[in-house]
Image (cartoon, helix red, strand yellow):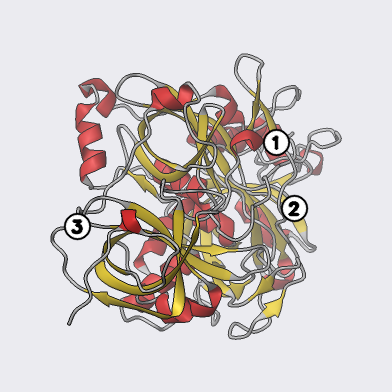
Amino acid sequence: MSRKVDYVKDINDSKETWRLAVRIMDVWSVVNNKGIEHLEMIVMDSLGDRIQVLIRHDHLLKWKEVIKENMTCIINNDSVYNNDFQWKICDHSKKIVFLGGTTMKAIELQNIPPKGYFFKDFGEILQDKCKTDRPEDIIGAVSEINHIQSNTPGKKVVVSVVLKDLKGNCINCNLWEIYGSKFLAYYNDPKNNGAIVILLTHAMVKDGQVSNAWSGSKLLINEDIPEIQDFMSKLPTNEQKEKPTQSAKSLSNWSGGSQYSPVEMFVHNAKCMSLSQFCKIKHETLCVTVATTLKFAVSKYGWFYYGCTRCSSKAPNPEKAYECSCGQKVEQPIPRYKIEIYVSNGESKYRFLFWDSECAAILGMTAEFMHNSMVENGEDDPMVYPDELEMLLNKKMTFRVKVQPTFSQASVWKLCDDEAFVKEIENDYIVEDNQSKTEYAKLVPNKENLETSAQTLSASGENDPESIILMTPAKDVVIADKGEEVDFEASGATQLSGTKPSKKLKIEPSS
């Protein structure tokens, strides 16, 4: 005799033999500060009721490859506890925790509603009518890009945009790390024109603004799904054709009060020279130049290396757990970009080494995601360069690099592909062969704390992963257009975790 199916609304802690017929609405991985991973997901039954589910680390291997978003299934036997998640995705007072005896069978269930989103009204966000422990789904059109902080040692990528709904309400949205990099990659792609509609799931809401969570959020940009296409179709015709603008401070990418321009800060303490002069350099030298990415320089190491899950340090062994020098306990090292590319300017050519963060910013995806996608498609040869990497080629950019003549290569520290920025560097700073040595480098006078990132709509790369560690920043206050302070700590991204409250992210001032 078959056991009857229970409903989500009836779940309580009176038993562990619950039998649920549900759709997996969302699933995500959470890694705590000790490097231990677990899974969380949201399931929904035929009545539309939802409940949050936790799969602990000791059951991870059993379920990680089995559970798929949007699948329908029968789940038998699980523990029930009070919903003490720091961030409660749904209103149910209980949560489900998988047991050793939990079973799940995939089955077609037509009576369960399809995967959907629960969008929060911008008016309620602006009126602060939101639960502080409740992440929300949001959708809106990007009307302006008002701040960009690039990835430099001690700082993380964050892009702040203004989102507008169909009623004309506007809110600030802060996109951190890979979310910000994904947005920049889309915005910088010349093939993408017109309005940008973004859908952000599990957004953290505070003080009238939103941000992604470290874990759990999904960012969809102009994707071909009904929710985005319907929103786009309802925009005024003229707005559908307009690409979002950049505010003055996003173009400068630095806090107000400094007497130096973004270009001056980019070239600070570096020698500005044409690519043709690189072959004359005898010692390691910090240089700024303009060049166009030409083709991959295929090495025996391929296009990625295995590194720490927190910083960019190289793992001693890609198949073994270890404790990194940054303090992170790494269960499984992850792929990180390390790509050698020939760049050219006129007849001159040189080999540049691109690191993880700038590649992720341009490509809009992590090396781990790209590698896993290849494996899923049956390609397990690490020396095969995926087609998506072609987006790195044929781009004219300004580079801040450390030239390493011993290896006949240059390691990329920062880059910028903004056309006006590149043109100013090229016309006003690059010194040709026939100029005197006194004009060899235009340096900005030394000034405390001047060394900041200064590229527009771009993310700067870290140094060699053997030596650089990107730590959690401390605090960031950015000067807004009208002189008021915009505190990014107030809406800093966090991790959707059911085990331990996450620390607030703070970052140092960017100037």
Horizontally, residue 314 falls left or right of residue 30, namely right
Where does label 2 land, which residue? 286
Seen in the picture, residue 318 relative to 462 is either above or below; the reply is below
Q: Can residue 390 be seen here?
A: yes
Residue 71's spot in the image, x, y percent? 26, 66
Is 6 left, or right, of 187 in this rendering? Answer: left
Front-lying residue, 303 or 255:
255
**Upstream in sequence: badge 2 or badge 1:** 2
Q: Is residue 365 above or below residue 323?
A: above
Mark 1 belongs to which amino acid?
Asp
The residue at which mark 3 appears reads as 112
**SS state under label 2:** strand
Q: Earlier in the sequence, mark 1 or mark 3?
A: 3
Structural crowding at the residue carrying mark 3, measured as other residues with C-alpha within 10 Å and reported as few (<14), some (14–19) or many (≥20): some
Quadrant of res 430: top right
Mark 1 → mark 3, Cα distance in angstroms: 45 Å
Amino acid at circle 3: Ile
Q: Of the residues tagged 1 and 3, which is closer to the observer?
A: 3
Residue 331 percent coordinates (x, y): 61, 77
Identify residue for label 1. 476
Quadrant of the drawing holding the C terminus = top right
Q: Residues within 10 Å of mark 1 (few under 14, many from 20)?
A: many
Quarter of the image containing the N terminus?
Answer: bottom left
CA distance separating discs 2 and 1: 27 Å
